[in-house]
């Protein structure tokens, strides 16, 4: 039997505590909505939030996380640089990272990308059509050619990120903009997936297709068995040297 994937879902958990309308959409927090779905699909799930000690990301938690799911928006600057460094180190060593929506501006995503990760945006509650542009990719499993979100915040190009190693989804918005909304990367031994949907005031993380993509991404990003990588001086050659 395959080992269950250990997932930590991280969320600022500020909007839901400060805005009653958002709390009504996500009474258990955005992290709770995502965690509940993943638990129902075979994952061992822990949640963590910004205002917990160490932002809920202690060394023990990180060392026992296969995939970290990250949602942030209004308090990126409050995330400790020390915690960011620890998450960065774990990704390089093989932990998967799924960055959602406004997490594009998180310290950890910008550090891993090495760019501003800036973009255009508009809050108008417009329709978003998300097209699959990497048919057969495991993150798009079960999605079909496209799916639609009735109301979402618009993100538009140019999106200042490195060219994705695989672009899985492209979004079109009712106002006419397009956006690279499903981007795969590798950094060190870790896999990273950025997924655009998820504005806090809309029930996006209750939509089956969105949750299916996140679940697929968790399976794709989990660490794989590989030989231990070594670096540095190798005094003994693999084969005998002849002069």
Image: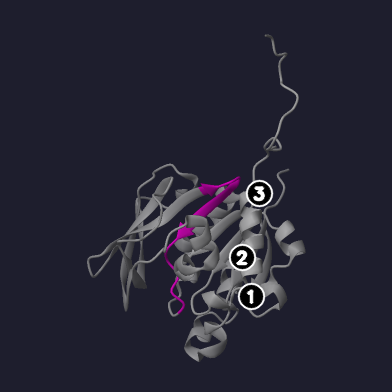
| Dot 2: element | helix
Q: Is residue 216 visible?
A: no
Dot 3 or dot 2, earlier in sequence:
2
Dot 1 or dot 2, earlier in sequence:
1
Pointers 3 and 1 in contact (C-beta within 8 Å): no
Pointers 1 and 2 in contact (C-beta within 8 Å): no
State which mark lies toward you, 3 or 1.
3
Q: List the residue tagged with mark 3.
A: 93
Q: List the residue tagged with mark 1.
A: 49
The residue that appears at 77% across and 62% down in the rendered structure is 60
Work out whether 72 lies above or below 65: below
- Position of the N terminus, as image quadrant, is top right
Residue 192 percent coordinates (x, y): 53, 53
Name the one closer to the observer, 177 or 90: 90
Q: Residues within 10 Å of mark 2 (few under 14, many from 20)?
A: some
Range drawn in magenta = 186-200
């Amino acid at each position: 039997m395959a080992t269950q994937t250990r997932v930590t879902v991280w969320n600022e958990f500020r909007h839901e505590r400060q805005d009653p309308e958002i709390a009504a959409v996500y009474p258990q927090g955005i992290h709770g909505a995502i965690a509940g779905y993943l638990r129902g699909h075979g994952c061992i799930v822990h949640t963590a939030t910004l205002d917990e000690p160490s932002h809920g990301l202690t060394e023990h938690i990180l060392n026992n996380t296969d995939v970290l799911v990250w949602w942030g928006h209004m308090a990126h600057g409050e995330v400790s640089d020390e915690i960011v460094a620890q998450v960065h180190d774990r990704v390089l060593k093989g932990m998967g990272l799924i960055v959602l929506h406004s997490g594009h501006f998180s310290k950890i995503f910008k550090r891993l990308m090495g760019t501003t990760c800036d973009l255009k945006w508009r809050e108008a509650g417009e329709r978003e059509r998300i097209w699959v542009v990497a048919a057969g990719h495991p993150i798009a499993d079960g999605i079909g050619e496209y799916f639609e979100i009735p109301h979402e915040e618009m993100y538009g190009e140019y999106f200042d990120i490195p060219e994705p190693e695989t672009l899985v989804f492209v979004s079109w918005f009712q106002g006419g903009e397009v956006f690279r909304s499903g981007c795969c990367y590798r950094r060190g031994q870790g896999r990273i997936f950025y997924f655009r949907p998820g504005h806090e005031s809309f029930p996006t993380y209750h939509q089956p297709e969105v949750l299916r993509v996140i679940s697929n991404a968790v399976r794709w990003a989990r660490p794989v068995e590989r030989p231990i990588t070594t670096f540095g001086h190798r005094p003994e050659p693999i084969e005998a040297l002849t002069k």
